[in-house]
Amino acid sequence: MRICARCDKPIRDGETYEVRHIEAASGPGGTVFLHAWCKRIAAAQPRRHPNH
Ligand SMILES: [Zn+2]
């Protein structure tokens, strides 16, 4: 089952989602999935810690 990395809810068959490959600094990394709308929400949010 695919789980959305943004909202931690399952992505059902037929739902629009995006596959994203993650490169972890300390690990093998992996592949995550995002609902299409979760991706839009994430992109619209400004960074809270720009200096971090
Ligand atoms: Zn989601």
Image: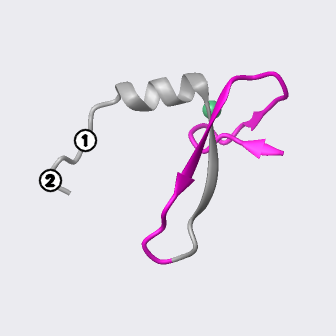
Give the vertical position of 5 relative to 39 (above or below): below
Give the vertical position of 48 relative to 42 (above or below): below
Which amino acid type corresponds to the residue marked 2 in the rendered image? Answer: Asn
Q: Secondary structure at mark 1?
A: loop
User: Ligand 1 within 8 A of label 2's CB?
Assistant: no
State the residue position of label 1: 48
Residue 17 quadrant: top right
* Residue lying at 27% horizontally and 32% vertically, measured from the top left: 46
* Residue lying at 72% horizontally and 43% vertically, measured from the top left: 3
Q: Which mark is residue 51?
A: 2
Q: Which residues are magenta?
A: 1-26
Q: Nearer the viewer, residue 3 or 23?
A: 23
Q: x and y percent of residue 1 in the render?
A: 84, 45
* Residue lying at 71% horizontally and 37% vertically, measured from the top left: 9
* Residue lying at 52% horizontally and 57% vertically, measured from the top left: 22
The Cα–Cα distance between marks 2 and 1, rounded to whole angstroms, is 9 Å
Query: Magenta span: helix, strand or loop, mainly?
Result: loop
